[in-house]
Amino acid sequence: MRAHEAGALHAEGYRGPAWLQTPADVNALVPSLWAQSVERGDDGVLSVGGVGVADIAREFGTPAYVVDEADFRSRARSFKQTYDEVFADLCSGADVFYAGKAFLCTEVARWIHQEGLHLDVCTGGELAVAIRAGVPGERIGMHGNNKSVAEIRAALEHGVSRIVIDSFDEIERVSAVAAELGVVAPVLIRVTVGVEAHTHEFIATAHEDQKFGLSLSGGHAFEAARLVLERPGTLRLLGLHTHIGSQIFDTAGFEVSAHRALGLHTRIAKELGHAMPELDLGGGFGIAYTTEHDPLPPRQLALQMAAIVERECRADGVPVPRISIEPGRAIAGPSTFTLYEVGTVKPVDLDGGASRAYVSVDGGMSDNVRTALYDANYSCTLANRASDAEPVLARVVGRHCESGDIVVKDEFLPSDITAGDLIAVPGTGAYCRALSSQYNHTPRPPVLAVRDGVARVIVRRETIDDLLALDV
Ligand SMILES: *Cc1c(COP(=O)(O)O)cnc(C)c1O
């Protein structure tokens, strides 16, 4: 049995994990968890972009992912403007690559492009979305630890601005495809720097036992640079790439990572005579899913990163390369909530006399697998009305045939919550639709964008016919 964060049950009964406060007002929204336009009106109904959730549910059904378009765009724009400003004197600005794997559809790819960002894709499928959205090649980077020849060819034919090389095999593979197409492929080398960051701490080791990148300490990354530089007719070495993890809340891990990466950057300049023009510091900037998280504003993050890069480059005596970063979750995550309808409410007795309300909704692990997969915490609120009832400890669960099918592990909801109510779960813009499945033959929910009082479908709901269409 797993010990709970809160430890032993409190005398008055279990109150959830230590970070979870009993709310003074169960109807109040915690601003850091919600998209900017989300508010509860005088009628108690939650609205986003001026549209009430009851109207959204009536028109589009539930469950549904609801994106505040202005919020998504403003987070994207703010990353780009902030990094451009902060890095202006060091390397005449910075490139912000939105990590498309967090959430991508044609419309979102357009927003990213219109707001001046670049786009990272890591499969032929994500590339196809980018191309369909009209994102030009020079704004696209391609990732992946096992890109196929067809994917590399598609990327080079579209003229992507960088392919991130992840293995020795890939040096040969990209070089061969470039030769076939008669182009020179711009490449970065993904370096494992031995830093693994999680939430509030990071681990720095010499070696990394994981599939991504080429080891710095083992000399593989340097050797890869040498091999790339041996192929000037087909490969152009732009720089090194690092990515140390996700849900990172401070720059300590970046500091170690940048120190090590710039050490290699300098060594390549001195020993191989190649001054690389770029350096990618990766993504992983944390967001607030619950009150336990307190992310740094992008500006503070940028200032700290710039100070680190400047200090390291000065110490190494090399010019500052053009910096790029790759936020995914920090742009998409907070822009979106998932809207569900409650189907059943069941009190369940816990040890020590406490009890918990199990609230079943019409979605679950098929539309948000992060709780089951990463033991992630989410928050939620009653969305179609306010309530005067006292808050009770609740668990929001899905409709799938697994006891691990949990959406929100611990949250206080009003005790009068009942079938037909709507629940909104914030922070579901990243890695929810992207990781969704059709488990139990469940059609996937739509993605709705709301802006200036209008809600529209940007990814439609799957139908039973969609499910059956693949079944030959
Ligand atoms: C996943 C990933 C990102 C984005 O991570 P977030 O936590 O969404 O910011 C950026 N770069 C690479 C290489 C990744 O694999």
Image (spheres, grey):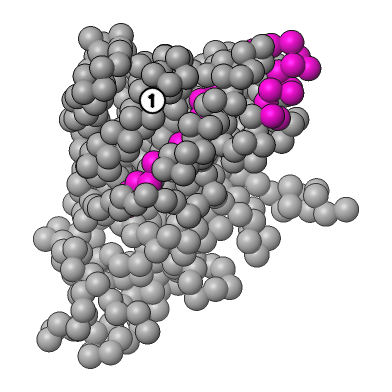
Residue at 44%, 67% in the rendered image: 406
Residue 135: horizontal and vertical position, in percent? 57, 17
SS state under label 1: helix
The residue that appears at 33% across and 28% down in the rendered structure is 262
- Residue at numbered disc 1: 267
41 to 408, vertically: above or below: above
**Can the viewer see residue 268 in this picture?**
yes
Q: Tell me: residue 205, above or below residue 144.
A: below
What residue do we see at 50% from left, 76% from top?
403
Left or right of 154 on screen, residue 348: left
Q: Position of residue 421 (x, y in %)?
A: 39, 60
Disc 1 under 8 Å from ligand 1? The reply is: no
> In this view of the protein, can residue 190 be seen by the observer?
no
Q: Which residues are magenta?
A: 172-198
Q: Is residue 143 left or right of residue 382?
A: right
Image point 35% across, 46% down: which residue?
Answer: 195
- The amino acid type of the residue labelled 1 equals Arg
Please determine whether, in this image, residue 115 is positioned above or below residue 441.
above
**Which of 242/116 is in front?**
242
Q: Position of residue 222 (x, y in %)?
A: 48, 31
Check disc 1: other Cα within 10 Å, few if <14, some if 14-19, many if 20+: some
Q: Is residue 256 covered in magenta?
A: no
Query: Closer to the camera, 9 or 203?
Result: 203
Task: Tell which residue pokes out farthest to the right in this image.
Answer: 472
In this view of the protein, which residue sits in the foreground, 337 or 457? 337
What is the x, y in percent for residue 438? Answer: 64, 56
